[in-house]
Every structure is written in structure tokens, then in C-alpha cells.
Amino acid sequence: MTEPLPKAPPKGLKLGWLEGNFESITIITPGFEKATQALGWDLVKISYDPGDPPSANSAMQQAVQQGVDYIAITGLDSQVFGEALAAAKDAGIGVVEMDIAAEKDAESKGVLACIACDAMVSQWGKILTEWMIADSGADAAIVYVNIPEFTSLSAELSSVQDTVKSECSKCTIDVLNSTISALGAGTISQEVASYVQTHPELDYIYFGFGLMARGSPEALESGGIGKNVKIVTADPDKVNAQNIIDGKESAGVLLPVEGHAWYAVDVMARDSVGADIQGTVDAPMPTQIWTKDNIPEPAQYWHGPVGYEDQFKKLWGVG
């Protein structure tokens, strides 16, 4: 992303951030706080429960009622907040979706852009799958733990399956579907342990994002199963990072956690001055893989490359 805005965005705009109460969502919030502060915008945080998807519709309705200029939401698509999205469109409020399978008719519904959607999650799936292929000597039995309600995970799964098919003739890929409710209740680890017990050939457990892996290393250890099974995740959080340091997990493909917010705000900033937004929508996010060999200590999130915030500010004309 190298194209500067023709002028600095107007100050005083309001961004409504629908902050789901999952850790994988709340860790993005500081990025929105910093990005809006840089622009002189107001951030309106509205909480909802991703375990109760319809509550996202109510949260978006609340943002519309509060007269925000833009809305950002992650992990859920308009199937669960379509009524509120229509209200936002009628009010002239641009909505930016993040971390989902991009909706084909999104623009007609009032969606301004989709950040970290199909192209990016496909890249992450390919990268981490290629790591497993290399690590296994091109002979890996993999299970992908999926939550179909998070549509971006299905896009990631497709990438994993395609990579296995095209790059590893001896590898196998299976799918273990779970639910948002199980994630909220912390029972995915039990589902994983049951799967491992009945699949002794398994080599790798791939979790679509880090929080999904919570408790699985302990469940396998306590059950005396899966001693040679390696756990890998996309979007590792601090717990996953510590597990990699301790040898309980093997690898994580990183997403720029706070960087998500800066990319979303960049779309809004460009829209606010009538600039083209496609450079942001199509821009690949930086990423890397952490393993025990290269992970920094102490355990931490990866928010993005050093200095990326200053690069955004320069493009916006405020740095």
C-alpha cells in the first residue's frame, strides 16, 4: 500500500466498532483506538456476544442509532445482521467486514469492504499447510478443526484442502466441525480428544484460530493420547504462544492483530475523502510462522511489523 490520500480525512468522524466479547476479537480493539486517535476520530465500542449471533444485529442497530459514520465487525456476515445492515445503508453508513468469506453481493447490501477475507485466509491456510507438509516429510495426516458459523474458517479450510491435494500425494486431510457454542463453553478440547482417540494415525491438528485450541494440549496429555500429534493454529494468541515456547504446540501462522484495525480504518479514511479503496481491500497483510525456534519471549501477540502504524499515518497525511 503506497498510495497516499489526496488530503487528510476530516476530523470528528465516529467509528462504531462491534466488539464481540471473545478474546480473539477484543485484542483487535487497541488497534482501532490508536488508528482513530491518529485521525482525530471518535471510537464507539458496542459489545455483543458472538455465541449469540443475532445479538450482532442489535449491536449494529445501536451503532446506527448513535449516528456513527462507519461500522466495523469481524467474524460474522450479513446473514445474522442483515436487518441492521439495511438500516446502515439507508443512513449512509459504510460497513467494513473482517475475517469472513467475502459476500458476493456485499456492495449492494451496503458493505464498503471486506478486510482479511478470502484471499488472506487462503494465504494463511496455504502457508501453514506447507509448513506441515515440510515438517512431516510430505506424509502428514491432518485434521482441520472448523466452526462453519465463522465463514472465514471454511475459506481457510478450502485452501488447506487444495494445498494438500496439489502438493502432497501422501498427505490426508479430515475435518472436525464444532460450533460457536462449544467455543464459548470451552468444550472443543473434549471433541478433539475424542477424535484423536479414534484416529491413531493422526499427525497434526490444525485450528482455524488460536482460541479454538484452548485446553486441547492438556486434554490430550491427561488422556494419555496423541503423544506424537502436533498442534498448529492460525492467529495464535498469548496462550498459544506460551504453548509453542513450552513445546505443547508446534507452529502458528500469524495475523497482524491490531493491524486488522488499521487496514479497516484505512478503507474508511480513503472513503471519507473519495479516494479509491481497492488498494487496501486487495493488499496482502504481512505474516510469518512462529515455531519454538523463532518465537520471541515472553509470550506475546504479534500486532504487525515494527513501524507499520507510522506508515499508515504518513499515507493519511497525519503523521
Image (cartoon, helix red, strand yellow):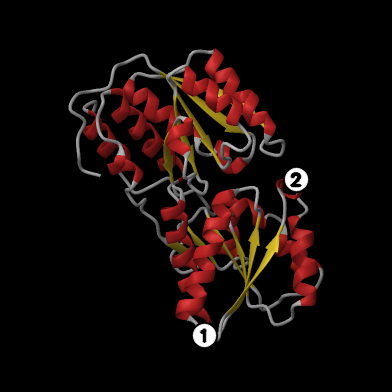
Give above or below for 172 relative to 31.
below
Viewer-proximal residue among 239 and 94: 94
Give above or below for 286 relative to 35.
below
Residue at the disc numbered 1: 169
Secondary structure beneath disc 1? loop
Q: Is residue 291 visible?
A: no
Q: Residue at x 71, y 39 (%)?
A: 51
Query: Along the horizontal axis of the image, is 137 left or right of 279?
Result: right
Give above or below for 307 relative to 213.
above
Q: Residue at x 48, y 19 (%)?
A: 90
Select label 2 or label 1 by which is in front. 1
Give above or below for 11 relative to 264.
above
Counting from the top left corner in percent of width and height, residue 228 is at 66, 79
Viewer-proximal residue among 67 and 262: 67
Q: Earlier in the sequence, mark 2 or mark 1?
A: 1
**Disc 2 residue type (three-letter):** Ser
Q: Tell me if label 2 and label 1 are in contact, CB under 8 Å.
A: no
Classify residue 233 by image quadrant: bottom right
Q: Residue at x 57, y 36 (%)?
A: 78
Query: Along the horizontal axis of the image, is 159 left or right of 55?
Result: left
**Disc 1 residue type (three-letter):** Ser
Determine which of the numbered discs, if any, sits on residue 266 in the image: none
Counting from the top left corner in percent of width and height, residue 220 is at 75, 68
Secondary structure beneath disc 2? helix
* Crowding near the residue tagged with mark 2, few <14, some 14–19, many ≥20 C-alpha atoms within 10 Å: some
Counting from the top left corner in percent of width and height, residue 58 is at 65, 24
Residue at the disc numbered 2: 181
Query: Along the horizontal axis of the image, is 45 left or right of 9?
Result: right
Q: Is residue 267 visible?
A: yes
